[in-house]
Protein backbone atom coordinates (compact mmCIF):
# COMPACT_ATOMS: atom_id res chain seq x y z
CA UNK A 1 0.00 0.00 0.00
CA UNK A 2 1.23 3.48 -0.85
CA UNK A 3 1.78 6.17 1.75
CA UNK A 4 -0.95 8.45 0.41
CA UNK A 5 -3.46 5.59 0.64
CA UNK A 6 -2.61 5.12 4.32
CA UNK A 7 -3.17 8.82 4.90
CA UNK A 8 -6.62 8.57 3.31
CA UNK A 9 -7.53 5.74 5.70
CA UNK A 10 -6.32 7.75 8.71
CA UNK A 11 -8.23 10.85 7.62
CA UNK A 12 -11.39 8.85 7.02
CA UNK A 13 -11.30 7.89 10.71
CA UNK A 14 -10.06 11.25 12.03
CA UNK A 15 -11.03 14.01 9.55
CA UNK A 16 -8.61 16.92 9.57
CA UNK A 17 -11.42 19.47 9.80
CA UNK A 18 -12.24 18.28 13.31
CA UNK A 19 -8.92 19.56 14.70
CA UNK A 20 -8.98 22.67 16.85
CA UNK A 21 -7.62 25.85 15.23
CA UNK A 22 -3.83 26.10 14.88
CA UNK A 23 -3.28 22.46 15.80
CA UNK A 24 -0.34 21.09 13.82
CA UNK A 25 -1.81 18.00 12.19
CA UNK A 26 -1.32 16.07 8.99
CA UNK A 27 1.93 15.30 7.20
CA UNK A 28 4.82 16.44 9.39
CA UNK A 29 7.82 15.17 7.46
CA UNK A 30 8.03 13.62 4.01
CA UNK A 31 7.72 14.20 0.29
CA UNK A 32 7.37 10.88 -1.48
CA UNK A 33 3.83 9.72 -0.75
CA UNK A 34 3.92 7.28 -3.68
CA UNK A 35 6.33 5.01 -1.78
CA UNK A 36 5.21 1.51 -0.95
CA UNK A 37 4.75 0.88 2.76
CA UNK A 38 5.45 -2.54 4.18
CA UNK A 39 5.74 -1.61 7.87
CA UNK A 40 3.74 1.09 9.63
CA UNK A 41 4.88 2.32 13.04
CA UNK A 42 2.56 3.97 15.56
CA UNK A 43 3.47 5.93 18.69
CA UNK A 44 2.11 8.56 21.01
CA UNK A 45 5.14 10.82 20.64
CA UNK A 46 7.69 11.42 17.87
CA UNK A 47 10.50 11.27 20.40
CA UNK A 48 14.08 10.62 19.38
CA UNK A 49 13.83 7.19 20.99
CA UNK A 50 10.72 6.36 18.95
CA UNK A 51 12.29 7.53 15.70
CA UNK A 52 15.46 5.54 16.35
CA UNK A 53 13.29 2.50 17.02
CA UNK A 54 11.37 3.13 13.80
CA UNK A 55 14.68 3.12 11.94
CA UNK A 56 15.85 -0.12 13.59
CA UNK A 57 12.55 -1.86 12.84
CA UNK A 58 12.54 -0.74 9.19
CA UNK A 59 9.37 1.31 9.53
CA UNK A 60 8.30 2.81 6.19
CA UNK A 61 5.59 5.13 7.55
CA UNK A 62 5.34 6.61 11.05
CA UNK A 63 2.10 7.73 12.69
CA UNK A 64 2.16 9.67 15.94
CA UNK A 65 -0.61 11.29 17.93
CA UNK A 66 1.50 14.28 18.91
CA UNK A 67 3.07 16.40 16.16
CA UNK A 68 6.82 16.74 15.87
CA UNK A 69 6.64 20.55 16.09
CA UNK A 70 4.24 22.21 18.52
CA UNK A 71 5.87 25.46 19.60
CA UNK A 72 7.70 27.82 17.25
CA UNK A 73 11.25 26.64 16.55
CA UNK A 74 13.95 29.07 15.41
CA UNK A 75 16.63 26.55 14.56
CA UNK A 76 17.05 22.86 13.77
CA UNK A 77 19.74 21.65 16.14
CA UNK A 78 20.02 19.07 18.90
CA UNK A 79 17.29 16.38 19.12
CA UNK A 80 15.07 17.90 16.42
CA UNK A 81 17.97 17.81 13.95
CA UNK A 82 18.68 14.18 14.85
CA UNK A 83 15.02 13.26 14.35
CA UNK A 84 14.78 14.96 10.97
CA UNK A 85 18.08 13.45 9.86
CA UNK A 86 16.82 9.91 10.46
CA UNK A 87 13.39 10.52 8.93
CA UNK A 88 14.76 12.16 5.79
CA UNK A 89 17.71 9.80 5.36
CA UNK A 90 15.44 6.75 5.61
CA UNK A 91 12.59 8.46 3.70
CA UNK A 92 10.08 7.78 6.50
CA UNK A 93 6.93 9.93 6.19
CA UNK A 94 5.70 11.16 9.58
CA UNK A 95 1.99 11.85 9.93
CA UNK A 96 0.14 13.12 13.01
CA UNK A 97 -3.53 13.19 13.96
CA UNK A 98 -3.80 15.11 17.22
CA UNK A 99 -6.98 16.87 18.39
CA UNK A 100 -8.90 15.44 15.44
CA UNK A 101 -8.15 11.96 16.81
CA UNK A 102 -9.24 13.11 20.28
CA UNK A 103 -12.51 14.51 18.95
CA UNK A 104 -13.61 12.08 16.22
CA UNK A 105 -16.16 9.31 16.60
CA UNK A 106 -14.55 6.29 18.29
CA UNK A 107 -11.49 8.45 18.93
CA UNK A 108 -9.55 8.78 22.17
CA UNK A 109 -12.27 10.51 24.17
CA UNK A 110 -15.03 8.16 23.00
CA UNK A 111 -12.83 5.24 24.05
CA UNK A 112 -12.57 6.68 27.57
CA UNK A 113 -16.31 7.30 27.73
CA UNK A 114 -16.89 3.68 26.74
CA UNK A 115 -14.33 2.42 29.27
CA UNK A 116 -16.19 4.11 32.11
CA UNK A 117 -19.54 3.07 30.62
CA UNK A 118 -20.84 6.63 30.71
CA UNK A 119 -24.48 7.22 29.82
CA UNK A 120 -26.09 10.24 28.14
CA UNK A 121 -22.68 11.25 26.83
CA UNK A 122 -22.13 14.76 25.50
CA UNK A 123 -19.11 16.77 24.40
CA UNK A 124 -17.30 18.46 27.26
CA UNK A 125 -16.33 21.48 25.17
CA UNK A 126 -18.06 23.09 22.20
CA UNK A 127 -15.09 22.27 19.95
CA UNK A 128 -15.67 18.56 20.58
CA UNK A 129 -12.88 17.93 23.05
CA UNK A 130 -13.68 15.77 26.07
CA UNK A 131 -16.84 13.96 27.07
CA UNK A 132 -19.21 14.15 30.03
CA UNK A 133 -21.83 11.63 31.08
CA UNK A 134 -23.45 9.75 33.93
CA UNK A 135 -21.68 6.92 35.75
CA UNK A 136 -23.80 4.42 37.67
CA UNK A 137 -21.57 3.52 40.56
CA UNK A 138 -19.28 4.89 43.24
CA UNK A 139 -16.00 6.74 43.24
CA UNK A 140 -14.28 3.52 44.29
CA UNK A 141 -15.65 1.87 41.13
CA UNK A 142 -14.23 4.65 38.97
CA UNK A 143 -10.88 4.49 40.69
CA UNK A 144 -10.72 0.72 40.18
CA UNK A 145 -11.37 1.09 36.43
CA UNK A 146 -8.69 3.77 36.23
CA UNK A 147 -6.06 1.73 38.04
CA UNK A 148 -6.73 -1.38 35.95
CA UNK A 149 -6.83 0.34 32.55
CA UNK A 150 -5.24 3.79 32.61
CA UNK A 151 -2.63 4.21 35.34
CA UNK A 152 -1.96 2.05 38.39
CA UNK A 153 -1.19 4.86 40.86
CA UNK A 154 -3.17 7.95 39.81
CA UNK A 155 -2.85 11.18 41.72
CA UNK A 156 -6.24 12.20 43.11
CA UNK A 157 -8.15 14.99 44.81
CA UNK A 158 -10.99 13.39 46.75
CA UNK A 159 -13.45 15.38 48.90
CA UNK A 160 -15.19 13.26 51.55
CA UNK A 161 -18.63 14.00 50.11
CA UNK A 162 -17.92 11.93 46.98
CA UNK A 163 -18.07 8.66 48.94
CA UNK A 164 -21.80 9.08 49.64
CA UNK A 165 -22.81 9.22 45.97
CA UNK A 166 -23.98 6.16 44.03
CA UNK A 167 -24.38 7.95 40.69
CA UNK A 168 -21.84 10.43 39.42
CA UNK A 169 -21.50 13.01 36.71
CA UNK A 170 -18.12 12.26 35.15
CA UNK A 171 -16.05 14.36 32.75
CA UNK A 172 -13.11 12.92 30.84
CA UNK A 173 -10.51 14.55 28.60
CA UNK A 174 -7.64 12.62 27.05
CA UNK A 175 -4.19 14.13 27.54
CA UNK A 176 -3.73 17.53 29.14
CA UNK A 177 -7.01 18.57 30.74
CA UNK A 178 -6.28 19.31 34.37
CA UNK A 179 -5.46 22.99 33.96
CA UNK A 180 -6.78 25.49 36.47
CA UNK A 181 -9.25 26.95 33.97
CA UNK A 182 -10.54 23.55 32.89
CA UNK A 183 -11.04 22.39 36.49
CA UNK A 184 -12.99 25.58 37.24
CA UNK A 185 -15.18 25.00 34.18
CA UNK A 186 -15.83 21.31 34.84
CA UNK A 187 -16.59 21.90 38.53
CA UNK A 188 -19.81 23.65 37.50
CA UNK A 189 -21.49 20.44 36.35
CA UNK A 190 -19.39 17.34 37.14
CA UNK A 191 -18.59 15.38 40.30
CA UNK A 192 -15.47 13.71 38.90
CA UNK A 193 -12.94 14.91 36.32
CA UNK A 194 -10.53 12.39 34.78
CA UNK A 195 -7.64 13.67 32.67
CA UNK A 196 -3.89 14.25 32.86
CA UNK A 197 -1.15 16.65 33.95
CA UNK A 198 -2.38 17.81 37.35
CA UNK A 199 -0.12 20.59 38.66
CA UNK A 200 0.39 21.87 42.18
CA UNK A 201 -1.82 24.91 41.61
CA UNK A 202 -4.49 22.95 39.76
CA UNK A 203 -4.69 20.56 42.69
CA UNK A 204 -5.31 23.45 45.06
CA UNK A 205 -8.07 24.80 42.81
CA UNK A 206 -9.76 21.38 42.76
CA UNK A 207 -9.56 21.12 46.55
CA UNK A 208 -11.05 24.59 46.98
CA UNK A 209 -13.90 23.88 44.53
CA UNK A 210 -14.64 20.47 46.02
CA UNK A 211 -14.42 18.55 42.76
CA UNK A 212 -12.98 15.03 42.61
CA UNK A 213 -10.03 14.83 40.23
CA UNK A 214 -8.20 11.77 38.94
CA UNK A 215 -4.92 12.29 37.11
CA UNK A 216 -4.54 9.24 34.90
CA UNK A 217 -1.48 10.93 33.34
CA UNK A 218 -1.25 12.45 29.89
CA UNK A 219 0.24 9.21 28.58
CA UNK A 220 -2.30 6.88 30.18
CA UNK A 221 -5.43 8.76 29.14
CA UNK A 222 -4.28 8.92 25.51
CA UNK A 223 -2.62 5.54 25.01
CA UNK A 224 -5.80 3.71 26.05
CA UNK A 225 -7.63 5.03 22.98
CA UNK A 226 -4.54 4.88 20.79
CA UNK A 227 -4.47 1.11 21.29
CA UNK A 228 -7.98 1.00 19.83
CA UNK A 229 -6.86 3.11 16.87
CA UNK A 230 -4.00 0.68 16.29
CA UNK A 231 -6.58 -2.11 15.94
CA UNK A 232 -8.41 0.00 13.35
CA UNK A 233 -5.20 0.41 11.36
CA UNK A 234 -4.39 -3.30 11.59
CA UNK A 235 -7.86 -4.11 10.25
CA UNK A 236 -7.80 -1.62 7.38
CA UNK A 237 -4.16 -1.48 6.27
CA UNK A 238 -2.67 -4.61 4.63
CA UNK A 239 0.82 -4.20 5.99
CA UNK A 240 2.72 -4.95 9.16
CA UNK A 241 2.02 -2.56 12.07
CA UNK A 242 4.29 -2.07 15.06
CA UNK A 243 3.78 -0.15 18.29
CA UNK A 244 6.81 1.94 19.21
CA UNK A 245 6.07 3.48 22.62
CA UNK A 246 3.13 1.60 24.12
Image (cartoon, grey):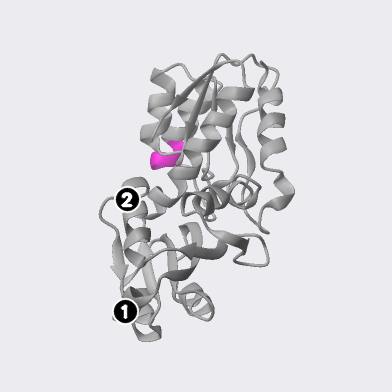
Residue 36 in view? yes
Q: Say which quarter of the image contains residue 217.
A: bottom left
Span highlighted in magenta in the image: 77-81
Question: Residue 161, position in %: x, y?
Answer: 33, 81
Q: Residue at x 62, y 67 (%)?
A: 125
Q: Say which quarter of the image contains residue 34.
A: top right
Q: Give above or below for 65 relative to 234.
A: below
**Residue 153 appears left or right of 97:** left
Residue 130 in view? no
**Residue 36 appears left or right of 51:** right
Question: Residue 22, position in %: x, y?
Answer: 65, 57
Q: Residue at x 32, y 55 (%)?
A: 144
Which SS type dominates the magenta stretch?
helix
Q: Give above or below for 40 relative to 42.
A: above
Q: Residue at x 71, y 45 (%)?
A: 16
Task: Please name the residue that numbered disc 1 is placed on.
Answer: 159
User: Is residue 80 on the magenta stretch?
Assistant: yes
Amino acid sequence: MKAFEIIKIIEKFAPKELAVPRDNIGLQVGLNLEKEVETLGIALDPSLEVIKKAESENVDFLFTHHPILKDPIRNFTGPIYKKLKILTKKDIPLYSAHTNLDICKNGLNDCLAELYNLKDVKNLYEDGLGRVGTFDGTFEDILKITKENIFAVPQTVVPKSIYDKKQLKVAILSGYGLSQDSIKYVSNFADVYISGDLTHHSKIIAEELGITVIDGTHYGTEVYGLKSFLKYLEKNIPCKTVSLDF
